[in-house]
Amino acid sequence: MRGLKIAGLAVLAVFAVLFLALWAVLGTQVGSRWVLNQVPGLTVDNFQGRLGGQWSADHLLWQQDSSRVELNAPRFD
Protein backbone atom coordinates (compact mmCIF):
# COMPACT_ATOMS: atom_id res chain seq x y z
CA MET A 1 0.00 0.00 0.00
CA ARG A 2 2.83 2.41 0.85
CA GLY A 3 4.58 1.64 -2.44
CA LEU A 4 1.40 2.47 -4.32
CA LYS A 5 1.22 5.88 -2.64
CA ILE A 6 4.85 6.59 -3.52
CA ALA A 7 4.27 5.53 -7.13
CA GLY A 8 1.17 7.72 -7.34
CA LEU A 9 3.05 10.72 -5.97
CA ALA A 10 5.90 10.09 -8.42
CA VAL A 11 3.47 10.00 -11.36
CA LEU A 12 1.81 13.18 -10.10
CA ALA A 13 5.20 14.88 -9.78
CA VAL A 14 6.13 13.89 -13.35
CA PHE A 15 2.86 15.32 -14.68
CA ALA A 16 3.41 18.52 -12.70
CA VAL A 17 6.91 18.95 -14.13
CA LEU A 18 5.64 18.29 -17.67
CA PHE A 19 2.83 20.81 -17.20
CA LEU A 20 5.22 23.48 -15.89
CA ALA A 21 7.64 22.85 -18.76
CA LEU A 22 4.84 23.12 -21.33
CA TRP A 23 3.57 26.31 -19.71
CA ALA A 24 7.09 27.78 -19.69
CA VAL A 25 7.48 27.04 -23.39
CA LEU A 26 4.05 28.05 -24.69
CA GLY A 27 2.91 30.47 -22.01
CA THR A 28 5.87 32.84 -21.90
CA GLN A 29 7.48 35.03 -24.53
CA VAL A 30 10.96 33.78 -23.64
CA GLY A 31 9.91 30.15 -23.99
CA SER A 32 8.12 30.89 -27.25
CA ARG A 33 11.25 32.53 -28.66
CA TRP A 34 13.30 29.52 -27.62
CA VAL A 35 10.92 27.11 -29.37
CA LEU A 36 10.96 29.19 -32.55
CA ASN A 37 14.77 29.20 -32.50
CA GLN A 38 14.73 25.38 -32.42
CA VAL A 39 12.87 25.09 -35.76
CA PRO A 40 15.42 24.48 -38.54
CA GLY A 41 15.24 27.02 -41.36
CA LEU A 42 12.84 29.37 -39.54
CA THR A 43 13.48 33.10 -39.34
CA VAL A 44 11.10 35.35 -37.40
CA ASP A 45 11.48 39.15 -37.29
CA ASN A 46 10.08 41.23 -34.43
CA PHE A 47 8.23 38.44 -32.62
CA GLN A 48 5.72 39.64 -29.99
CA GLY A 49 3.51 37.57 -27.69
CA ARG A 50 3.48 33.88 -26.78
CA LEU A 51 2.74 30.76 -28.78
CA GLY A 52 0.09 29.62 -26.30
CA GLY A 53 -1.97 32.76 -26.90
CA GLN A 54 -1.77 35.80 -29.14
CA TRP A 55 1.38 36.44 -31.10
CA SER A 56 2.51 38.42 -34.10
CA ALA A 57 5.63 39.08 -36.11
CA ASP A 58 6.68 41.48 -38.84
CA HIS A 59 8.01 38.71 -41.07
CA LEU A 60 8.19 34.91 -40.89
CA LEU A 61 10.28 32.80 -43.28
CA TRP A 62 10.72 29.03 -43.27
CA GLN A 63 12.98 27.55 -45.89
CA GLN A 64 14.20 23.98 -46.26
CA ASP A 65 15.65 22.51 -49.45
CA SER A 66 13.35 23.66 -52.28
CA SER A 67 10.39 24.42 -49.97
CA ARG A 68 9.79 27.98 -48.85
CA VAL A 69 7.01 29.61 -46.80
CA GLU A 70 7.04 33.36 -46.33
CA LEU A 71 4.48 35.39 -44.39
CA ASN A 72 4.36 39.15 -43.95
CA ALA A 73 2.85 40.39 -40.69
CA PRO A 74 1.43 37.07 -39.43
CA ARG A 75 -0.93 37.39 -36.46
CA PHE A 76 -2.44 34.53 -34.46
CA ASP A 77 -5.05 34.77 -31.71
Image (cartoon, grey):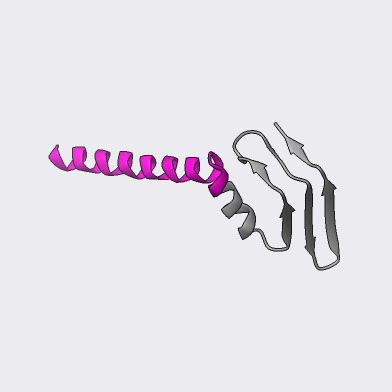
Q: Where is residue 23 in the image (x, y as percent from the top left)?
A: 49, 40
Residue at 72% across, 35% down: 76
Determine if the magenta segment contains residue 27. Answer: yes
Between 30 and 5, which is closer to the camera in this rendering?
A: 30
The single residue placed furthest to the left in the displayed view is: 2
Q: Where is residue 47 in the image (x, y as percent from the top left)?
A: 68, 47
Q: Which residue is drawn at 61% across and 59% down?
A: 38
Height in image: 11 above or below 66?
above
Task: Name the main secondary structure of what is drawn in magenta.
Answer: helix
Q: Where is residue 71 in the image (x, y as percent from the top left)?
A: 83, 48
**Magenta residues?**
1-30
Quadrant location, the N terminus: top left
Residue 40 appears in which quarter of the rendering?
A: bottom right
- Image point 19% across, 37% down: which residue? 5
Q: Is residue 3 left or right of residue 65?
A: left
* Residue in front for this viewpoint, 23 or 10: 23
Residue beneath the point at 84% across and 61% down: 67
